[in-house]
Amino acid sequence: MKFKNLSRKFSNDIGIDLGTATTLVYIKGKGIVINEPSVVAINKKTGQILAIGNEAKKMVGRTPAHIVVSRPLVDGVISDFEVTEQMLRYFIDKVHKKAFNFLSRPRVVIGIPSGVTEVEKKAVHDAAVSAGAKEAYLIEEPMAAAIGIRLPVQEATGNMIVDIGGGTSEPAVISLGGLVASRSLRIAGDEFNEDIIQYARDEFNLLIGEKTAEDIKIAVGSAYPLEEPLEIQMRGRDLVSGLPKEVTVNDEQIRQALSRSIKTLINNIKATIEETPPELISDIMDKGIILVGGGGLLRGLDKLITQETKIPTRVADDPITAVARGTGIVLEDIDALREILVWAEEGKVLK
């Protein structure tokens, strides 16, 4: 027992927001120390991993045929187990390489989408253990985000959060340490990028890449009419001539491109509210809906949700890091918060 306590003292316990687009790593007592893309570059000839994270992201759209840059997670779940394990190992090693940690491997808490299957939960758990974790715990991302922004999730009161990440969007109502009503849909930041790529193709016969679409989304994307119009140059390849082409697009055009996905998101938020008990609806009307995740930063999305649901909506402070901060808070007192976990270190499904 003494050795176990000593090993925990010297181990750097880790919280991980394992996102489709970005992975954030929280170290107990230090805060968020890694915020890198969930991207891996692989040499197809040798099977060797060439780069992970920021270095791999730089290669997107710029590699020769034998080098593939891919995301090992699709829509919030593992699509390539071995590559995900390598990516987790890279992040865990990066955290531990400067630490006095020979006595123990870390305990790890990982945020996962609320709609994943038991098989997918086990895949994440096993990947973390294979990557070097001593114990692996899983928590649903909406719950982790709610804890990260300090909502009273264990009290008998309703809290509504909408977590919009890269691969999934998850509206959820939380009370007494559990999800009372929730949805997990595959419409989020990546789908918004695809909408812009398709719009460029349909409207301008212009082929643009994923990174260009994301840059345009960040620069001029919105869900609600803006007070001041925004414009940006869209550059790509003309599908007719095959030559470079540049067109100017504004916020209204990009809003039109995103409109179908935004409408689907709003409808799922409404459906989650409809499934919520009346007593909790009263609490949510008082407290409002809170947006977290990178997608929550889309201009005017909070205004549109307020207009459509009649419930005040706001964006959380530092929404991108909410899930990672939540995993960190769980690490600080894992025994008291055990009831909110969906998988314990013994490999046992809790919920």
Image: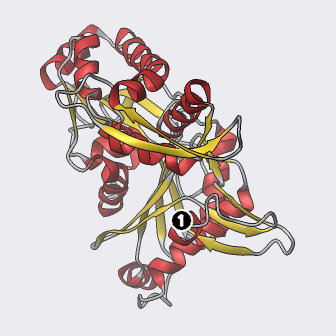
Q: Position of residue 320 (x, y in %)?
A: 33, 50
Q: Residue furthest right?
A: 45
> Which residue bears the numbered disc 1?
135
Residue 66 lies, with reference to residue 12, above or below; the image says: above
Residue 140 in view, yes or no: no
Q: Nearer the viewer, residue 3 or 266?
A: 266
For this view, does 141 lie left or right of residue 284? Answer: right
Residue at horizontal 24%, vertical 50%?
318
Q: Secondary structure at mark 1?
A: strand
Q: Residue at x 26, y 37 (%)?
A: 154
x, y percent for residue 129: 62, 66
Q: Image quadrant of residue 204?
A: top right
Given residues 223 and 123, the one toward you in this image is 223
Farthest residue to the left: give it.
286
- Label 1 packing within 10 angstroms: few (<14), some (14-19), many (20+): some
**Callout 1 amino acid:** Glu
Q: Quadrant of the N terminus?
A: bottom left
| Residue ID at (56%, 24%) | 203
Left or right, 326 with respect to 102, comes to left
Up/down of 68 relative to 242, above or below: below
Q: Quadrant of residue 67?
A: bottom right
